[in-house]
Amino acid sequence: MTKAAASNPLSVQVDNGGHHSNGYTRKESAARMPYQGRCSQGLPSTDSQASFSSCDADRGINFEASHEYVPLHQKIKSRINDGTPFFSLEFFPPRTANGVANFFTRLDRFNEGSPLFVDITWHMNSDPSNVDKETSSTSIALGCMNYCRMETMLHMTCVQYDKPTTIKHLEQCKKYGMRNILALRGDLPMPGTGAKPTYDYRALDMIRWIREEFDDYFTICCSGYPVGHPEAQSYEADLLYLKAKVDAGAQFIITQLFFEAESFEKFVRDCREIGIQCPIIPGIMPIMGYDSISRIAKLSQLKIPDWVLADLESIRHDDDAVRNYGTVKAVEMCRRLLQNGTAPSLHLYTMNREGTCREILQELGLWHRRPMRSLPWVPHGGNHPVRCKEDVRPIFWSARPKSYIYRTRDWDDFPNGRWGNGSSPAFNDIKDYYLFHIQGESNKEEQLNKFGRHIASIDDVKRVFINFLTQEPNEHGFVVRSLPWSEQENGVAEETSIIKNELLWCNENGIFTINSQPPVNGSPSNDPIVGWGKPGGYCYQKAYLECFISAEHSATLQRIIDAYAPRINYHIINHDASVDLTNSEKTTPIAVTWGVFPGCEIAQPTVVDPITFRVWKDEAYELWTNQWANLYPEGSESRQIIDDIHDTYHLVTLVDNDFQQPCILFDILERMVTESQQTNGHARAAR
């Protein structure tokens, strides 16, 4: 829920004074006045998903906000020319669908630190080229690019395939917009097994095929071995083979792991002496466990230095001590390589683990929180060859960007400058979005702790929404960091604090808010709460609220709402669209966020579109059942209550078009609640 339930962590305190029995006051809230903003004085935003890389912003270069795709090798070259260190990360595909969901959540956290790119290994057991299998290497790589908005490189091996099959794999990558390939031979059968490789192709062959068949479409990376490939005739012969790969078209090198800085320093000198001039990035694998590093070294046919083994001997059975040792040694080696200029960047072999890698990058000063948002929502920018031009979206999916990306993934073009007619594009069916349906047992336990092990009444549902907004522990000791209408477990957005009391009042009165934004009137673009876009600009927002209300409240709202036209636009709909009422133009979107920036046309990145709202409606209602009601047994009281909300409540959007005046949306809702209570009271009296 962007705004009413959004992506930034914020612990807010409830105002215990006020006019209502629950202690939540509206009348004294600053939300009634349009937010004017404040200058951030250069302070970075707390938005963990904002869209500028700090070092890019310092140089006036913003690849992520670019409307043109910048090839990865050019980004690397630009960083090196500017002397700006960067980092990249390697992952392998998870084995299970639940693992995939957890992986993408972890990747979102990694994305906070601004990696230049990530790469995904070609794992044979994953059926790596199968885009229809959620755990395949190709599917995971496309997910990183599409859903996590990261520049992504896919490993690809060729020894297991004939040439036409490898070309087919590459054609598939091109079809889906993948632009970066790490060309590898692949593992040969283990010695002593008697098995032979399927084909006798090498990485050099694949690099040549890529250039012959695809010209310069792909950025090509190749591997280098600081102490020589274990199968090479000699270290010198391996260097010459590496040069052949570069001469054939490889544009940068990532090395195999190594244990001593001297190995990489010598390797770089030797490469330069024989004419290899492309970037050489060291592959860093921190020691995270004694057994794991021993196993990896054996598989890689690398010798762990005696001094490392001696250091580890006394702590080999203490996992925390080994991990701390590995972190310290990795930081020492990386700092040396960065400071002496041998390494322009670092490539971390993460082993899909988060803590150690983040600690190393933070200690080295490479973990950069992004200080400004280029748009109110997180764009792909220059990290996606097709979506790089996208700069307009409906507000409805603000807290479910991965779902929106999935449902629009087959579009040939994306809105740029204006939304247009929402009836033109076709949205993919949410039922095909596998992340929507994952419900593992451990996840189910967490959901029950958040949403309640037993729902006895509507009041229990109210408490879940209120606990989310307050970010205070519930009766189970859990903080509700997300609701079904948000993908991130990050709590509420800082922007929500502006209208927090208003939203608390709504939910206490059975108005279940799932999306909102306060009015903003000319806030500086570097405002730490609502700012976005280029420096020196000003941001504007119309107040917006999206909520579920009872049929009784809806009847009252329908009776009174037209009195507020044309200032207020509304759309009221139910789960099967048998109720579908709006005073908006049937095909005309309403801009609810816009910005004015030096040297630019007015930007309108967020809209309320009546046609698209009908598409979103199905997803919004299904989340009640799929993510909440299904937690409980069929026929149970808890399930019946949530199902009844799904079946009888109406979904409402409200837009206050006068962003310069105090917001009146909550006044309208207060009148709705009061008149509904009066109507119900009269009905009871008549009986």
Image (cartoon, helix red, strand yellow):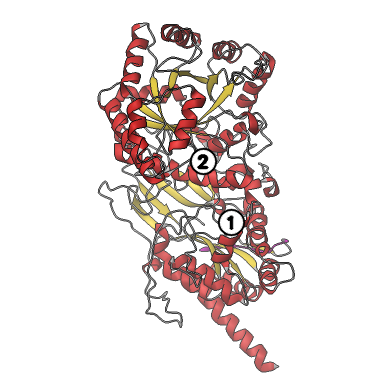
Q: Which quarter of the figure has residue 308? A: top left
Q: Which residues are magenta?
A: 567-576
Callout 1 amino acid? Asn
Crowding near the residue tagged with mark 2, few <14, some 14–19, many ≥20 C-alpha atoms within 10 Å? many
Q: Residue furthest front?
A: 314
Compared across the picture, whether 209 is left or right of 505 comes to: right
Q: In this figure, which residue is indicated by the disc labeled 1?
A: 443
Crowding near the residue tagged with mark 1, few <14, some 14–19, many ≥20 C-alpha atoms within 10 Å? few
Q: Which mark is residue 148?
A: 2
Q: Secondary structure at mark 2?
A: loop
* Residue 380 can be seen in this image: yes
Callout 2 amino acid? Cys
Q: Distance between the Cα atoms at labels 2 and 1?
A: 21 Å
Q: Secondary structure at mark 1?
A: helix
* Residue 655 can be seen in this image: no
Residue 87 in the image: above or below residue 221: below
